[in-house]
Image (spheres, rainbow, N blue to C red):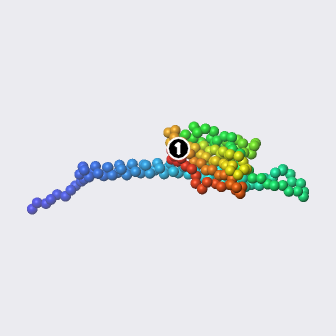
Amino acid sequence: MKTRRGREGFTLIELMIVVAIVGILAVLATYGVRKYIASAKTTEARNSIGRLSNAAVIAYENENMNSPVLAAGTSTGFTRTLCNSASANVPSGIGLVTGAKYQSTATDWNTDSAGNSGFSCLHFTIDEPQYYMYGYNVSGTSTVGNSFTAFANGDLNGDGVLSTFSITGSINSSYIINVAPNMLAIQPEE
């Protein structure tokens, strides 16, 4: 009686199929991990721009008197004004965050402290190393239609293509700041 001998291994075709499947899974995993890391880095910009816009609204709503001293028995109106534009971005140039992180100093954020404008007026700083360059610009300070824009520019992969995040707020006819409901993101994962 003849017995048939069982298979003792895999054929070359079976091994090639397994290698191809593992290769495809590795490519998909690499793409997914890169996308996740880029998304995690953009969170810094989204959070910081949100904090900047909140700081601008809080600074505007802070009551300031028309005169420094109020005499007994008198009254004065209060004014609301936007913090003036920052005179410098932090860091000062995009090259400092191109494919790199930048560790800012207190001096970076307090450049405008003498005039109580910019980041100093907003009481805004970032203590951790940052992937983005931040800026704050204002058009006017206290009239209907005047606005602010907070922005972040970065180049996460160092290829020269910038990602930009920005948010704008403007003073409406009731002298309240309306902040855009959405943050503008241009090429967020570059």
Q: Which residue is tagged 1?
A: 156
Who is closer to the viewer here, 58 or 40?
58
Q: Residue furthest left?
A: 1
Residue 140 x %, y % = 71, 46
Who is closer to the viewer here, 120 or 56?
56
Residue 157 x %, y % = 50, 42
Disc 1: CA contacts within 10 A as few (<14), some (14-19) or many (>=20)? many
Q: Is residue 180 left or right of residue 160?
A: right
Residue 76: image quadrant is bottom right
Q: Residue furthest bottom?
A: 1
Q: Is residue 169 left or right of residue 39?
A: right
Residue 62: image quadrant is bottom right
Residue at 22 percent across and 55 percent down: it is 8
Name the secondary structure under disc 1: loop
Residue 79 x %, y % = 77, 53
Residue type at numbered disc 1: Leu
Task: For residue 176, say whether it is visible.
Answer: yes
Q: Residue furthest right?
A: 72
Residue at 44 percent across and 51 percent down: it is 32
Residue at 68 percent across and 43 percent down: it is 86
Residue at 30 percent across and 52 percent down: it is 18
Residue 91: image quadrant is top right
Task: For residue 122, say whether it is visible.
Answer: no
Q: Is residue 26 left or right of residue 86?
A: left
- Number of disc labels: 1
Q: Is residue 127 above or below residue 4?
A: above
Residue 100 x %, y % = 55, 41
Q: Quadrant of the N terminus?
A: bottom left
